[in-house]
Amino acid sequence: MIVFDLKCSADHVFEAWFGSSDSYEDQRSRGLIACPFCGASDVTKAVMAPNIATRGNRTQEVLPAVQPVASVPTAPAEIKAFLAAAMAVQAKMLEKSEWVGRSFADKARAMDAGETPHAIIHGEVTKDEAKALIEEGVAVTPLPFPVIDPAKHN
């Protein structure tokens, strides 16, 4: 696994995890990466500070590469508003995605192997299934919030 700081065309900086650098490049080239703040798909790598190990007798201090876009909410009302806004961004991103439920792993593998056309999908997998997909190099990204099966949604 590798983590990158990414930046969208609206200058939002966010962190994303990938199975490899090639996995990032593949997802970016197919337009599968979107900003969690605004949904923009024009995303590039942001400047990151290197994490250099220190000698064993010193403490290691990691400094952020960039300043946060907004202050972190601390009051319950601010936290609720922030989470609601983040969930709205995820919902907006999923508007163009097809729910495939428990067949997600099979469909993602089929697309990765070129057996079926590439499409934007979302669904359910177990933690072990997700880990296996990532280890196989299949371009997948976990969603920050749970998604309810549309058939079960009121």
Image: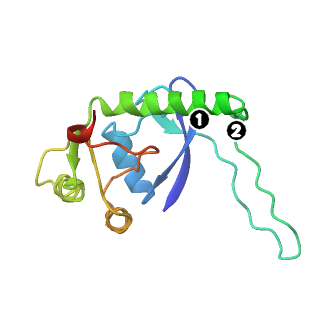
Q: Residue at x 11, y 54 (%)?
A: 115
Q: Which residue is at the far top?
A: 10
In the foreground, 87 or 56 = 87
In the rendered structure, find residue 13 and report the number of the disc placed on it.
1
Counting from the top left corner in percent of width and height, residue 99 is at 23, 41
Amino acid carrying mark 2 in the image: Val
Disc 1 is placed on an element classified as: strand
Q: CA distance from mark 1 to mark 2?
A: 8 Å
In the rendered structure, find residue 151 and report the number of the disc placed on it.
none
Q: Which residue is at the far left?
A: 115
Disc 2 is placed on an element classified as: loop
Q: Residue at x 22, y 55 (%)?
A: 102
Counting from the top left corner in percent of width and height, residue 120 is at 25, 40
Please determine whether, in this image, residue 71 is positioned above or below residue 148. Answer: above
Residue density around tag 1, few if under 14, some if 14–19, many if 20 or more, within 10 Å: many
Please determine whether, in this image, residue 85 is positioned above or below residue 58. Answer: above
Please determine whether, in this image, residue 130 is positioned above or below residue 48. Answer: below
Counting from the top left corner in percent of width and height, residue 27 is at 35, 45
Q: Which residue is at the far front?
A: 154
In the rendered structure, find residue 66 and report the number of the disc placed on it.
2
Amino acid carrying mark 1 in the image: Val
Q: Residue at x 70, y 49 (%)?
A: 49
Q: Quick check: 83 left or right of 18? A: right
Q: Is mark 1 in CB contact (under 8 Å) with mark 2?
A: yes
Q: Which residue is at the far right?
A: 57
Tell which circle, 1 or 2, labels the residue nearer the N-terminal end.
1
Q: Quadrant of residue 92?
A: top left
Q: Quick check: 140 left or right of 6? A: left
Q: Is residue 8 among what the camera can see?
A: no
Q: Quadrant of the C terminus?
A: top left
Counting from the top left corner in percent of width and height, residue 1 is at 48, 62
